[in-house]
Amino acid sequence: MPKQFLPKHQYIHLDSIDSTSRFLKDLAEKERPLQPVICTTREQTQGYGQQGKTWLSEADSSIFSILLPLKSKAIVPGSASLKTALAIHKQLSKEINEPLTLKWPNDIYNTKGKVAGSLLELVALPHYRALVIGVGINHSPPKNMQTASYIASFDLKPFLEGLLTNLSVDNLLSHEKADDLWLSDWQAVDFFHINEPLQLIQQGENSALPVTYLGINAQGQALVQGEEKVYKLTSGANSLRKR
């Protein structure tokens, strides 16, 4: 397993692994690193996404996970997932020359479909905590995924350097209600539009509920108007689709 130590973080590249996020979670339990760790791989055989869904990776996908050490009692707000997706979106927009949008809570789309996704997981151990951020970016047409798309390949190492610079732990963990700068940045590239008719797929339900999109709030919740009430959707527990 080759290792390289770059300024302020550790970089690990694996030829093949079941999951880069699972690898970093195991590393956290064994070594409890005090600096960020980036893990990349050529092949991921058992990747996963929101709600335990399989993340299918093509041979030329960019697959990586990032471990960010936290204070031992740190609490991760729901907005952290959206702020992470926003940071990935901003860095990707520097690499490619096409418009990209953000679909709540953590997917990135071009005009043809989903090109990237991320998943945040909290590692909570006695006297140690860390965030593990798993990311997959498509660089070729994904098989058997009608709603997926892809973007051009780019040099991953500079991309990761830039992304890590923008993933400030203090910003991700901020609970300030007045911290709405990231909200305006999200709204500028939101996949959905205010007052757009959508379908709400609730966890454990087979049917779709017709709703109207009202945007997101500072807690990272998506707000939708149903027939009788406004729903505040928690990241990962529900999904929204265009009608």
Image (cartoon, rainbow, N blue to C red):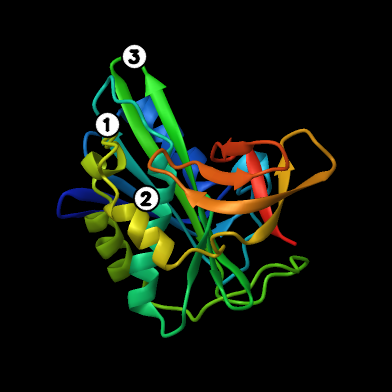
Q: Please tell me whether residue 187 is drawn above or below residue 150 in the rendered image.
A: above
Q: Nearer the viewer, mark 1 or mark 3?
A: 1
Q: Which residue is mark 2?
A: 83
Q: Residue at x 28, y 16 (%)?
A: 127
Measured from the top left, where is residue 198 in percent x and y? 69, 56
Q: Residue at x 42, y 61 (%)?
A: 187
Q: Residue furthest right?
A: 206
Which residue is at the front of the view, 88 or 65?
88
Amino acid type at mark 2: Lys
Q: Nearer the viewer, mark 2 or mark 3?
A: 2
Tag 3, which secondary structure?
Answer: loop
Residue 122: give its label: none
Q: Please tell me whether residue 12 is drawn above or below residue 120 in the rendered image.
A: below
User: Which quadrant of the structure image shows residue 43?
Assistant: bottom right
Instruction: State left or right for residue 48 relative to residue 99.
Output: right
* Marker count (numbered): 3
The alpha-carbon separation of the residues under discs 1 and 2 comes to 16 Å
User: Which quadrant of the structure image shows residue 189?
Assistant: bottom left
Q: Which residue is mark 3?
A: 126
Measured from the top left, where is residue 78 in percent x and y? 43, 36
